């Protein structure tokens, strides 16, 4: 299976947008090669602004461009964008419901050797609590490209989160992507897995392992954390009666928390949230870190078996 960095999809999406619409303005905080916005800088320099290491200024400038009827994409590492510029995103962008698009690169523990300071593990939580903000976590490079294009077509603030490492491409050009609409990528009757980002592929691997044990795992790509596809979440909970969530993020406040909030208020079933357990990351090779912190197919299998057993006791 081909592996491509999700950030490549972000860069390709921006190229397609910039080619068709001169209102597309890409801003970067001195990490253009890492975010792939250097592709815009090189091909459409009049639509690119390097703000330097100044994330707050970048978001403020993006807000001004939006007021001028431009469509700005502000891009940098997610940990700095969601963290350092949170006040500007909250008060300037979201409070005024401005049409600013935010690209948070290097999301999750799989950033690897860059270590804890660069591993965005709280960004989804910080973004999803903001009124008017849309939050997207695509599963591969192809879906990241589609998400980037879809962001430009919607009105209002939007945050897309993508990783640095190459991950397996599990969607293709024919795969449907719609903001706010989850995709069921594998059917199953026993347990539902809601996953996003690189954890969707891990979920598909887990489904194969569980099938050998006679357990059928429904795998749902919940790429849009906000607005949550509540209809699909509730329907899947009803169908299988047990739920696991998996994400490269703190187990508190992210996609798993959003799913648990929905299920607890509408159709309570056993739920297990897989994520970083209230800890920072560390330097290491991406796969080693994923294994150390339990972000693997094997961890999903264990959680699925656990909630399936809990379901039978109800």
Image (cartoon, rainbow, N blue to C red):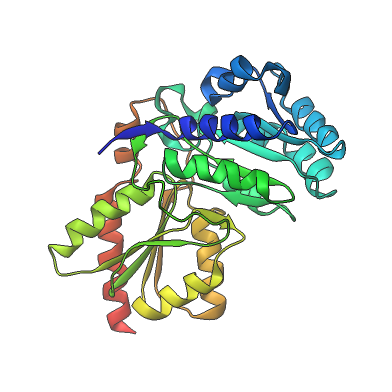
Q: Find residue 164 and report its horizontal and vertical position in percent.
A: 45, 29
Q: Is residue 96 left or right of residue 99?
A: right
Residue at 57 percent of width and 60 percent of height:
180
Residue at 70 percent of width and 16 percent of height:
52
Q: Is residue 137 above or below residue 22?
A: below
Q: Is residue 259 left or right of residue 190?
A: right
Quadrant including the N terminus? top left
Examine the rendering and report whether any part of residue 123 can be seen.
no
Q: Find residue 243 and report its horizontal and vertical position in percent.
A: 38, 68
Q: In which quarter of the image is residue 48?
A: top right
Residue at 63 percent of width and 17 percent of height:
41
Q: Is residue 215 left or right of residue 151?
A: left
Q: In this view, does 267 lie above or below 7?
A: below
Q: In this view, does 48 lie above or below 254?
A: above
Q: Is residue 92 above or below residue 47?
A: below
Q: Find residue 283 and report its horizontal and vertical position in percent.
A: 40, 25
Q: Which residue lies furthest to the left in this view?
A: 212
Q: Residue furthest front?
A: 20
Residue at 81 percent of width and 29 percent of height:
61
Relative depth, front residue between 219 and 85: 219
Q: Quadrant of residue 110?
A: top left
């Amino acid at each position: 299976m081909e592996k491509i960095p999700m950030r490549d999809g972000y860069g390709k999406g921006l190229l397609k947008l910039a080619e068709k619409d001169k209102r597309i303005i890409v801003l970067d905080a001195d990490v253009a090669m890492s975010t792939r916005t250097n592709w815009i800088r090189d091909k459409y320099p009049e639509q690119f602004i390097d703000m330097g290491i100044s994330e707050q200024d970048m978001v403020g400038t993006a807000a001004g461009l939006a007021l001028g009827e431009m469509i700005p994409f502000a891009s940098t590492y997610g940990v700095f964008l969601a963290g350092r510029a949170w006040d500007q995103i909250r008060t300037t962008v979201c409070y005024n419901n401005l049409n600013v698009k935010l690209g948070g690169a290097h999301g999750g523990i799989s950033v690897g050797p860059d270590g804890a300071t660069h591993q965005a593990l709280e960004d989804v939580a910080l973004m999803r609590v903001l009124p008017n903000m849309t939050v997207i976590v695509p599963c591969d490079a192809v879906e990241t490209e589609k998400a980037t294009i879809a962001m430009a077509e919607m009105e209002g603030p939007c945050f897309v989160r993508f990783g640095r490492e190459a991950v397996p491409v599990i969607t293709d050009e024919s795969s449907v992507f719609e903001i706010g609409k989850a995709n069921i990528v594998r059917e199953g009757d026993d347990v539902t897995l809601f996953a996003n980002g690189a954890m969707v592929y891990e979920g598909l691997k887990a489904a194969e392992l569980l099938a050998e044990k006679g357990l059928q795992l429904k795998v749902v790509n919940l790429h849009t954390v906000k607005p949550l596809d509540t209809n699909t979440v509730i329907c899947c909970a009803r169908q299988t009666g047990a739920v696991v969530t998996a994400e490269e993020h703190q187990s508190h406040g992210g996609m798993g928390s959003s799913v648990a909030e929905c299920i607890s208020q509408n159709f309570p079933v056993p739920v297990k949230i897989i994520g970083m357990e209230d800890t920072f990351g560390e330097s290491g090779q991406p796969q080693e870190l994923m294994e150390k912190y339990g972000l693997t197919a094997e961890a999903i299998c264990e959680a699925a078996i656990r909630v399936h057993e809990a379901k039978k006791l109800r």
